[in-house]
Amino acid sequence: MTKPPHEVRSLSGEDQLRDAHTLFRSAMHDPRVDDELWAFVLDSYDGATVLGAFDDSGMIGTLAATDSVIALPGGKVVPMAAVSRVGVRADRTRRGVLTSVMRTFLEGVSAPLASLRATEGSIYRRYGYGVATRYRKVQLDRTARFHDQVQAAGEVRLVQDQDEVRRLVPGLTQRFGAARPGGVILSDGYWRLTLRREGFVRLVLHEDGFAVFKTKHVGDHYGHRLEVLALFAATPAATVALWSFLRGLDLVDTVVAEGRPVDEDLDLLLVDPRACRYTEIEDETWLRLVDVPAALSVRAYGPAEPVVLEVVDELLPANSGRYLVGPDGAERTDRDPQLRLGVADLAAAYLGDRPLSRFAAAGRVEVADRTALADADRLFRLDEAPWCGTYF
Ligand SMILES: CC(C)(COP(=O)(O)OP(=O)(O)OC[C@H]1O[C@@H](n2cnc3c(N)ncnc32)[C@H](O)[C@@H]1OP(=O)(O)O)[C@@H](O)C(=O)NCCC(=O)NCCS
């Protein structure tokens, strides 16, 4: 019997984790992990599943995943494996290493869903991941002023002490981070590392939300650019209060947020809508339905006639089959399929980012019954865009 070119194993212990992390950072062209940073990085691996691929030369690939949760349409918050730190040693790419690692990983996941953020758009579809949330960049110019009818309510408090910021942010994200479908809650260790990496940041607290930001000096005078690193609010009034505090800070020329919901209409709040610019819509959540029957039955659906979906999953064939999906839930069925689609496209439609009819128009759903397509749109529809707002 020929020996497989590499084998995939579970990693544990600080030395193996450090090797895996160094391999990952090196694949990202940044292999520096000094001892001080490593303490935070190690902390962020707490409870993680970490896999390594090995051949005769040592470790050649890695992937890590932490137990997280994600908010679904209907409000349930369910377990989700948050995948990150995927990398293959540069002298071993394009030989199927990630394919082996991802297969081993997905076969071992107990959560119904997994998700990740992708460095490149061409990597993950083949493993059944689809783009389930998107975000856009927003920039508020110096002239941005909120009009008189805008209702901001509640006081804000600025926290500058870095120990207090680090102590408060993890709890705040647990409280406000999963308000929208697509929102996730990550570990305290993840936040400790992220805040350490960002350097000096400030926190604005409101009773119904919070924002984390940093400012950078730009230009010759006293002008600054303000970068919003996170902003979560449970009410429109809190959203306005936080944005208006950020925009109102003295000596700030521009306020920029890289990853805001695609339906956050800041322009409607402004006297001059052009003082706000939306640019660069990008993919945010790459979602994988690891257990299709469980995932389909746990989300809520809108009012419509049930439809029969045939799902095709080449990597995890136990997921393949027909599902009757309706307002009362989802179950396997023997009925004739009305719509047929791959598991990556089902994942892309799952949180309600875009209706299935648009996937059909793009040739990604086979339609045997057109009325079923209209019903599927009503079933999967969401009134607000799903969004996460946390990069991991
Ligand atoms: C992305 C990465 C992990 C892929 O690992 P890999 O072992 O080369 O992937 P595989 O050999 O298993 O690839 C499987 C298929 O995906 C394709 N593929 C993989 N990575 C790709 C990429 N970056 N661009 C285009 N195609 C890619 C391969 O060509 C292969 O296609 P084939 O089956 O038709 O031959 C590796 O390229 C890497 O470490 N990149 C730098 C770090 C990075 O971007 N990590 C991802 C963090 S989200």
Image (cartoon, rainbow, N blue to C red):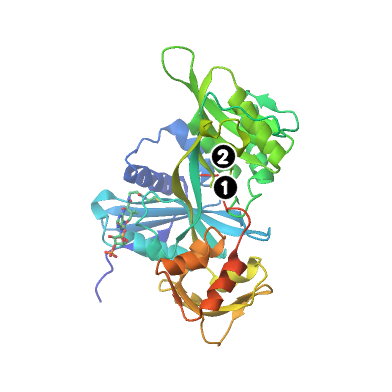
Residue 143, horizontal then vertical, whole percent: 54, 24
User: Which residue is depicted at the point 51% across and 67% down?
Assistant: 356
- Are discs 1 and 2 less than 8 Å apart at CB? no
Task: Using the image, tell me which numbered label, if any, was put on residue 191.
Answer: 2
The residue where tag 1 is placed is 263
Q: Quadrant of ligand 1?
A: bottom left
Q: In the rendered view, tell whether residue 88 sits above or below residue 268.
A: below
Residue 111, horizontal then vertical, whole percent: 57, 63
Tell me: 53 left or right of 215. Answer: left
Q: Nearer the viewer, mark 1 or mark 2?
A: 1
Quadrant position of the N terminus in the picture: bottom left
Element assignment for label 2: helix
Q: In the rendered view, tell whether residue 188 sits above or below residue 381.
A: above
Q: Is residue 145 visible?
A: yes
Q: In the rendered view, tell whether residue 205 sits above or below residue 125.
A: above
Task: Using the image, tell me which numbered label, if any, was put on residue 304.
Answer: none
Q: Is residue 256 visible?
A: no
Q: Nearer the N terminus, badge 1 or badge 2?
A: 2
Which image quadrant for residue 25?
top left
Amino acid type, residue under disc 1 in the picture: Asp
3D distance between C-alphas at marks 1 and 2: 26 Å
Element assignment for label 1: loop
Tell me: 86 left or right of 304. Answer: left
Q: Could you say which is closer to the camera, residue 49 or residue 280?
A: 280
Residue 19, horizontal then vertical, whole percent: 38, 46
